[in-house]
């Protein structure tokens, strides 16, 4: 049996062990270095994905804010949104808590939306909104019928009644306003059924365009605020609503570029404005309007077929109905401040000017 | 019995075994380092590639931001006038060129000393809090993706100190490399307008039909409804690979696809619609 009796042999063994340890350590360092570098690179990639993901979660929060505004008044109260769930089938092991809050400035509201991930990532975006009530001028509802020109060819027994909320006819408010010096050529048998006195006022001298008396924003802005499904709608020539629109809690603003005939006894609750300076032939119209009708030109052929009846329900609310005689029963007043359209103002989305 | 040492046979066997183990270990470590390097290089290339895509997506997404509602109204007013074709204004949201994309959006700015001679917004002097339009962009130059982010040249009263155009070269160029060909060679970078939907355009015009567009159509035949909102979708194509040779990109990943090719084709929509207008009274 071989024996290691000499100390020199034992010392050579120690050298071998030490050498092996050094080599192993160097190999470990090299391996560790490569692993860390790779890990960091992968981590950087992952963080970029997370950052992008946080932004999309913030978009979700913004959509939530818009939905929330659709059923609530815009206030500066922060609101906690629903979290974006971590779907069990999702490869992303993150969930996001969303929140949104508002900053009111003049006629506009700025919505901030934030998403904070379970891993600490976050993104904040903001978007300016214009609420529908801000686009309506205070004079829009002072008269049931506003005409930039004059009224002519009244035949039959049409009605423009101004009736208070208690059903009593009001005589101290204008039934209509016409251009200065443009007295209607004839009232015919207007309000013959109800017997209400027609009180006609005039716009200020020199007013030939009554747009600004109905709306506080210009046409371009109004058109940009309009949408196919919102509370502000803009109709090209020949276009018009296919269904009744508006409710007392959510009235509408309908802008017609031309005097497109509204037929089918559609109920419109809100403001209808016919922006046609060539005038408007109301013959054959069949509309049930609670609110106010503005025509940016002359109105002709207001006759019994047109059958407009106007009901002035409160100081600020008016109603025009088809049919004969007062029939406002069952229709609630609408609050002109209830134009709850929260329309996104184009050109105001950002993720840079927020904290 | 005395032990005098190892015999020659024993020593040779020991050396052979040690050599075999050393060789195996060396091969193992070499393979491990090679695999590690491959993973690292792929991850690094992917990170560079994603950085380009993510940067572009973020910039396009925020393009067209004009600031507060008041600033939006002022900007829209400048896009149209009573006598000429509406334009996209001084700061078009997205401009595209061959291998180049430029976007513009407003950012908060605090005027510095001397800025009153640069920007009308700083006429009140240093410290004025205002909003200026910035221009950002990416372009492809000899396999390298370059980036720029400066105050928009049209914002300056006089000449701009930095050239941020797609063709900028030389000392005044504001472009800086975002990638390195030693890491990744970008062979392809294209951005094209894929779709354009016009809202609120006057149907009396021919908006939306072939050959015309809202911003280029003269409103002479449009009556008096003269604003529109344009939602656009851009298609972006990026292709890169480690080999510094031009023209190897194979989007279909066919037989000639270069080793390590990274290819992505994506669509992005600015969050801000383009707004243009023209005076109603004209």
Image (spheres, rainbow, N blue to C red):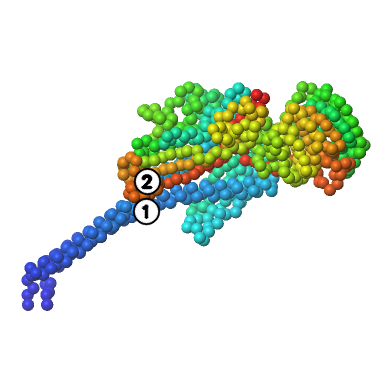
SS state under label 1: helix
Give the answer, above or below, for where A201 lies relative to A46: above
Residue at x 63% of width, y 43% of height: A102
* Chain under callout 1: A
Q: Which numbered marker is on residue A39? A: 1
Instruction: State left or right for residue B161 relative to residue A258.
Output: left
Q: Which numbered marker is on residue B250? A: 2
Residue at x 61% of width, y 45% of height: A101
**Could you tell me residue B198's position as x and y percent?**
59, 37
Give the answer, above or below, for where B83 lies relative to A312: above
Dot 2 surroundings within 10 Å: few (below 14), some, or many (20 or more)?
Answer: some
Q: Quadrant of the C terminus of chain B?
A: top right
**Could you tell me residue A84's position as x and y percent?**
56, 54
Whether residue A341 appears in this view of the structure is yes
Q: How many marks?
A: 2
Residue at x 85% of width, y 34% of height: A303
């Amino acid at each position: 049996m071989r024996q290691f009796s000499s100390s020199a042999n034992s010392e050579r063994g120690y050298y071998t062990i030490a050498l092996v340890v050094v080599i192993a350590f160097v190999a470990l360092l090299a391996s560790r270095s490569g692993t860390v570098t790779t890990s960091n690179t992968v981590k950087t990639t992952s963080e970029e994905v997370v950052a992008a993901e946080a932004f999309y979660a913030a978009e979700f929060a913004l959509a939530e804010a818009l939905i929330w505004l659709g059923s609530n008044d815009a206030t500066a109260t922060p609101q906690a949104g629903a979290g974006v769930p971590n779907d069990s089938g999702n490869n992303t092991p993150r969930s996001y808590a969303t929140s949104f809050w508002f900053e009111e400035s003049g006629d506009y509201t700025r919505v901030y939306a934030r998403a904070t991930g379970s891993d600490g990532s976050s993104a904040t975006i903001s978007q300016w909104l214009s609420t529908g009530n801000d686009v309506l001028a205070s004079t829009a509802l002072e008269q049931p019928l506003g005409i930039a020109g004059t009224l002519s060819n009244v035949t039959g027994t049409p009605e423009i009644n101004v009736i208070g909320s208690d059903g009593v006819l009001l005589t101290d408010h204008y039934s209509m306003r016409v251009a200065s010096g443009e007295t209607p050529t004839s009232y015919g048998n207007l309000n013959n059924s109800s017997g209400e006195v027609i009180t006609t006022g005039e716009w200020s001298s020199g007013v030939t365009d009554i747009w600004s008396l109905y709306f506080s924003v210009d046409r371009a802005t109004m058109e940009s605020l309009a949408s196919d499904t919102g509370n502000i709608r803009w109709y090209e020539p020949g276009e018009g609503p296919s269904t009744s629109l508006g409710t007392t809690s959510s009235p509408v603003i309908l802008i017609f570029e031309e005097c497109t005939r509204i037929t089918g006894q559609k109920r419109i609750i809100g403001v209808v404005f016919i922006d046609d300076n060539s005038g408007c032939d109301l013959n054959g119209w069949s509309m049930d309007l609670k609110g106010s009708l503005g025509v940016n030109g002359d109105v002709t052929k207001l006759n019994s077929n047109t059958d407009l009846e106007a009901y002035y329900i409160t100081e600020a609310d008016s109603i025009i109905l088809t049919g004969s005689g007062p029939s406002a029963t069952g229709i609630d007043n609408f609050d002109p401040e209830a134009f709850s359209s929260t329309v996104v103002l184009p050109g105001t989305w950002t993720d840079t000017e927020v904290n | 019995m005395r032990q005098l040492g190892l015999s020659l046979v024993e020593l040779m066997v020991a050396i052979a075994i040690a050599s075999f183990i050393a060789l195996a270990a060396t091969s193992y470590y070499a393979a491990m380092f090679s695999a590690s390097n491959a993973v690292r290089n792929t991850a690094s290339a992917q990170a560079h590639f994603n950085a380009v895509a993510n940067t572009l997506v973020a910039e396009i997404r925020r393009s067209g931001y004009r600031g507060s509602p008041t600033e939006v109204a002022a900007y829209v007013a400048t896009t149209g006038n009573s006598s000429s074709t509406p334009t996209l204004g001084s700061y078009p949201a997205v401009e595209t060129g061959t291998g180049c994309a430029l976007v513009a959006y407003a950012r908060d700015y605090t005027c510095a000393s001397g800025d009153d001679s640069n920007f009308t917004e700083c006429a009140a002097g240093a410290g004025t809090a205002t909003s200026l339009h910035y221009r950002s962009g990416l372009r492809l130059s000899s396999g390298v993706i370059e980036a720029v982010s400066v105050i928009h040249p049209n914002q300056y009263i006089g000449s701009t100190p930095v050239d941020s155009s797609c063709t900028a070269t030389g000392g005044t160029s504001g472009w800086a490399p975002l990638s390195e060909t030693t890491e990744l060679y970008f062979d392809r970078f294209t951005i094209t307008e894929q779709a354009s939907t016009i809202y609120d355009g006057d149907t009396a015009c021919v908006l939306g039909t072939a050959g015309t567009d809202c911003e280029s159509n003269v409103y002479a035949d449009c009556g008096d409804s003269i604003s529109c909102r344009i939602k656009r979708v851009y298609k972006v194509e990026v292709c890169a690979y480690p080999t510094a040779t031009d023209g190897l990109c194979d989007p279909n990943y066919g037989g000639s696809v270069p080793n390590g090719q990274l290819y992505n084709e994506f669509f992005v929509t600015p969050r801000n619609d383009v707004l243009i207008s023209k005076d109603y009274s004209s």
